[in-house]
Amino acid sequence: MKFGFDIDDTLINLREHAFTIYNKKLNKNVPSEVFHALQRVEIHEPFGLSNEEGSQMWKSSLEEIYYTDCPPFPNAVETLQELERKGHEIYYITARPKEHGERTKKWMKEQGFPVRDDRFFYGMQDHEKVQIIKELKLDYYFDDKAEVLDTLTHDSLKVFVRDQSYNRHLQYPRILNWTDLHEILKKELE
Ligand SMILES: [Mg+2]
């Protein structure tokens, strides 16, 4: 089977990692409950930043957000390693900008994710992911964003949403912890 994964906020806890960085950089102490209640993907509002300021803050912090110690979600690495061991194909499809693609690939390998160079796609806008997902003929695809998931409607693809505070209105089957995938696959593949 072919499995496709978004990276940020699907496999790794990027926004919460960035939230911690914002607290540090802005010398604030916004509690994590505020983060977990956010109804949008962007994290700047609780810091009193406008959209414009938030966008600047994100860009100027990007190096630190992407390449320091952002933690993978619990069991993400182990679950993907197991998929690979069982002979499944694993694809990564990320919107991270082109100039960050190769470094991101290297960073993902260092975290222990099973990455093959020809199965790693970057620089995709949300609405562009649909095309590559179709071309790759994926069987499963996992993402956190409505803007991506809602474009994926073709019949043979099974779509799952990685649970986040801003996507609870979506009706797709939901991954709360990556161990959930074992159960899903047990049911589907046996
Ligand atoms: Mg994402």
Image (cartoon, rainbow, N blue to C red):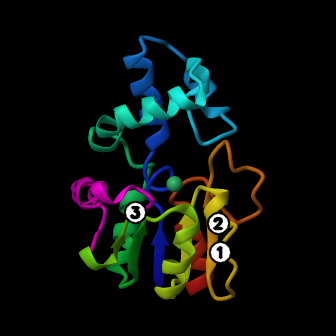
* Crowd rating for badge 1 (residues with CA inside 10 Å; few <14, some 14–19, many 20+): some
* Relative side of 75 to 38, left or right: left
* Crowd rating for badge 2 (residues with CA inside 10 Å; few <14, some 14–19, many 20+): many
* Crowd rating for badge 3 (residues with CA inside 10 Å; few <14, some 14–19, many 20+): some
Residue 152 is marked as 1
Give yes or no for residue 112 being in the magenta stretch: yes
Please provide the residue range marked out in magenta: 94-116
Give above or below for 104 relative to 182: above
Residue 93 is marked as none
Please name the amino acid that badge 1 sits on: Leu
Please name the amino acid that badge 3 sits on: Gly
Instruction: Give how far across and how far down residue 145 sits, in percent.
Output: 61, 56
Residue at coordinates 27% horizontally, 53% vertically from top-left? 111
Q: To which residue does mark 3 refer?
A: 123
Residue at coordinates 33% horizontally, 60% vertically from top-left? 98
- Observer-side mark, 1 or 3, equals 3
Residue at coordinates 48% horizontally, 62% vertically from top-left? 6
Question: Which one is in front, 182 or 47?
Answer: 47
Instruction: Give how far across and how far down residue 12 sits, in percent.
Output: 43, 50
Mark 2 close to ligand 1, CB under 8 Å = no
Instruction: Give how far across and how far down residue 19 sits, in percent.
Output: 47, 29
Please name the amino acid that badge 2 sits on: Leu
Identify the element where label 2 is drawn: helix
* C-alpha gap between disc 3 and disc 2: 17 Å
Identify the element where label 1 is drawn: loop
* C-alpha gap between disc 2 and disc 1: 5 Å
Residue at coordinates 47% horizontally, 67% vertically from top-left? 5
Evaluate if marks 2 and 1 touch, with contact meaning CB atoms under 8 Å apart.
yes
Give above or below for 17 relative to 83: above
Identify the element where label 3 is drawn: loop
Instruction: Give how far across and how far down residue 169 sits, in percent.
Output: 78, 52
Q: To which residue does mark 2 refer?
A: 149
